[in-house]
Image: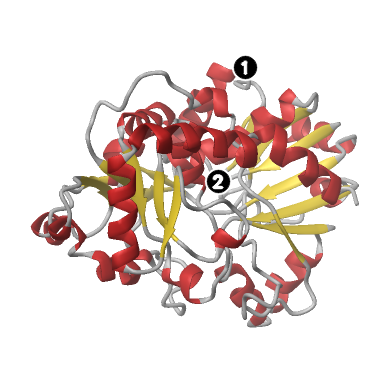
Amino acid sequence: MKVLLAGIVARYPYGGVTWCSLMYLLGLRALGHEVLYIEDTGECIYDPERDEISTDPSYGTRYIHGALEPFGLGDRWSFVNYDGSYHGLSQEVVRAFCADADLFVNLSGGSWFWRDEYAAIPRRVFIDTDPVFTQLAIAKGEPWYVEFFRGFDRLFTFGANIGTPACDVPTSDFTWHATRQPVITELWRTAAPPSRDRFTTVMTWKIESFPDVDGGKDREFLAYLDLPARTASRFEVAVNGPLELLAEHGWSPVDAMSVSRSLWDYRDFIRSSKAEFGVAKHAYVSRHSGWFSDRTECYLAAGRPALVQDTGWSAHLPSGTGLIGFSTMEEALDGLHRIECDYAVHATRASEIASEYFDATRVLPPFLEVAYG
């Protein structure tokens, strides 16, 4: 099968975002499928060297190539700039691939266009990595946005409760199928013990998209701001938020870009960590979406336990050993204590959960079955 996958690697050139697209590409290829990466958002890239949104796509195109080339995908990508110019593979080559492609996978808005060549692919699916926000945006009824989603045969979401009685987010007449980020666990697995005695995470403090939805992590994190003062556990947060405020409360913050500049920086940060402590976006929590983090999956695959806020995911995934959910300060403190007291058991179970629930060989076959159902 030939699969065209649209992602947002150049638009958001961060390690975590890159791994999301890359692991779909690698997982599909390992199952015997031919893959091609396309990026066609109509937006300019973020250039971290200039710290600005840039009309010059050169940083983004270098970044895509640098991320894909080590995995034998250096000639399997095309970036369409905001002005319609193609970089990497030409428009003609992309059209030729699409002409006999079998599946178009739009990951998190990797394209906002229905070009003729995309629309002609027999099966077309969208993967919503940002549940609640996506559904609320559709519910506004903006004609172009609604029609865009009508162009897909199947809609998938990382929110396991979307469209169920457990979640009150409106879905209109759209059906959302639950899925998870596939992880190539062997790329994260390590025999080395953590080099730092820190619970860590990588996070965006406040999102710029969907400004009418009070849904960022800042609102949830503030409820746990005093956590370091109540435990002997140590923390380090890679964040693009209020570093001074977090430092005053014992979180040892670092700039998020410093650990997300590349695939390898991001992976090294996670692997060197003792475990993850993470909160979720307020929208995910308040609407009981069932969202589960692709970043947390990577911690688990690296054999690092995860203590993360429950958005309703605990109804679908094991919680208690290796992976622990919390909804209150007291539950967070208890989870920290349990991991600290029996770390080896939690680390072993973390790896097991990653293999059982998130490995690409477990996630992608049922995803493809629904896509073609």
Q: CA distance from mark 1 to mark 2?
A: 19 Å
Q: Amino acid at mark 1?
A: Gly
Colour convention: secondary structure
Q: Secondary structure at mark 1?
A: loop
Please give the residue where the numbered disc 2 appears in the rendered image. 8
* Mark 1 touches mark 2? (CB < 8 Å): no
Q: Position of residue 185 (x, y in %)?
A: 56, 29
Q: Position of residue 82 (x, y in %)?
A: 56, 50
Left or right, residue 48 beside residue 366: left
Number of marks in the rendered image = 2
The quadrant where residue 218 appears? bottom left
- Residue at 86 percent of width and 31 percent of height: 1
Above/below status of 326 relative to 324: below
Residue 186 in sight from this viewpoint:
yes
Please rate how many residues cluster around mark 2, counting C-alpha atoms within 10 Å: few if below 14, some from 14 to 19, many from 20.
many
Q: Secondary structure at mark 2?
A: loop
Left or right, residue 123 beside residue 57: right
Q: Amino acid at mark 2?
A: Ile
147, 177: nearer the viewer: 177
Q: Position of residue 128 (x, y in %)?
A: 63, 58
Residue 50 in sight from this viewpoint:
no
Please give the residue where the numbered disc 1 appears in the rendered image. 72
Q: Which mark is residue 7?
A: none
- Residue at 60 percent of width and 53 percent of height: 108
The quadrant where residue 334 appears? bottom left
- Residue at 35 percent of width and 30 percent of height: 265
The quadrant where residue 167 appears? bottom right
Above/below status of 131 relative to 89: below
Q: Position of residue 317 (x, y in %)?
A: 59, 53
367, 261: nearer the viewer: 367
Q: Earlier in the sequence, mark 1 or mark 2?
A: 2
